[in-house]
Amino acid sequence: MTVLDVANVTFGYTEVDVLENVSLTLDDGEFLGLVGPNGSGKSTLLSIALGLRRPDSGTATLFGEPAHAFDDGHRIGFVGQGVASNDRSVPITVEEIVRLGRFPHAGFGRFGPADHEAVDRAMETTGVAELADRRIQSLSGGQRQRAFIARALAGEADLLALDEPTVGVDAESREEFYSLLNGLSADGVAILLIEHDIGVVTEHADTVACVNCTIHYHGDPSGFGADVLADAYGTAQQVVHHDHCPDHA
């Protein structure tokens, strides 16, 4: 099933287009990495795909419905920029964070057995079960990141939309995070990830899309090379693949 479909989308905040005739799809269980230079329109494209903005022309659909009218929000888990390094003063535990993901199902009533099971399962899947009683401000960046992913999973999300969630996360935690995403993708969760580290994306994602106003590449990571980078970034670039050592850059 096609989870997300952006077709011939053009959008501009002013008279200058940020996105021009952009088309992109995402299917069940697909892990799509979205890359491009700063200011290239990546976050704008994500907001249109999720129905938060309406394109000037073209269409965006979620699970076959117009994205701007899609109202089954529990099917989408969103983790925004800086989630691992934002304000740490909120006095809330990991379990309380994860429980928030169940409110679209439980409403304002009491949690039932299915809700408790979903929360426990999400924390086990993301490896934060042992941190359930810890305050979120006491966690490392990688732990906080996994707690917010658990919140999305507790809501039984079919789509994870992640906007540079690894900012402020150390290299070792970042590798653990990508292993988690690969496992979720294998379980059928569709993943759309905006990431600045091209080497990591091409190593872990099923599909790579490179955007800078238009789509410069959309396909298998193996075909994403220096020519695409030069076209999209405007200067000579090179994809750097990491060695998985804890101290890699």
Image: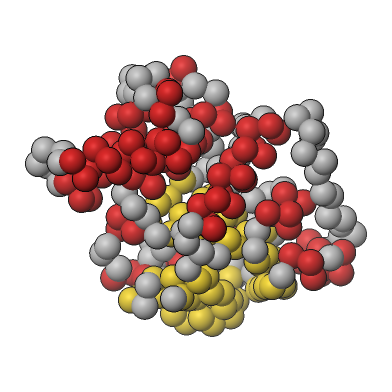
Q: Percent from the top left, x then y, of residue 86?
A: 49, 30
Tell me: 209 left or right of 112. Answer: right
Q: How many marks?
A: 0
Q: Is residue 106 visible?
A: yes
Tell me: 43 left or right of 154. Answer: right
- Where 249 sits versus 105, above or below? above
Image quadrant in which you'd find residue 237: bottom right
Image quadrant in which you'd find residue 193: bottom right
Tell me: 198 left or right of 158. Answer: right
Question: What residue do we see at 54% from left, 82% from top?
Answer: 8
Question: What residue do we see at 77% from left, 51% from top?
Answer: 199
Q: Nearer the viewer, residue 124 or 77?
A: 124
Question: What residue do we see at 52% from left, 70% from top?
Answer: 26
In the picture as drawn, the residue positioned furthest to the left comes out as: 109
Q: If the image is split into quadrants, where does the N terminus sit?
A: bottom left
Q: Percent from the top left, x then y, of residue 115?
A: 22, 43
Q: If the image is split into quadrants, where does the C terminus sit?
A: top right
Question: What residue do we see at 36% from left, 78% from top?
Answer: 64
Q: Percent from the top left, x then y, of residue 3?
A: 44, 70
Q: According to the image, what is the colour scheme of the structure?
A: secondary structure
Q: Is residue 211 visible?
A: no
Q: Percent from the top left, x then y, of residue 124?
A: 42, 36
Q: Nearer the viewer, residue 139 or 45?
A: 139
- Where 16 sits versus 187, above or below? below
In the picture as drawn, the residue positioned furthest to the right comes out as: 236
- Where 33 sits versus 227, above or below? above
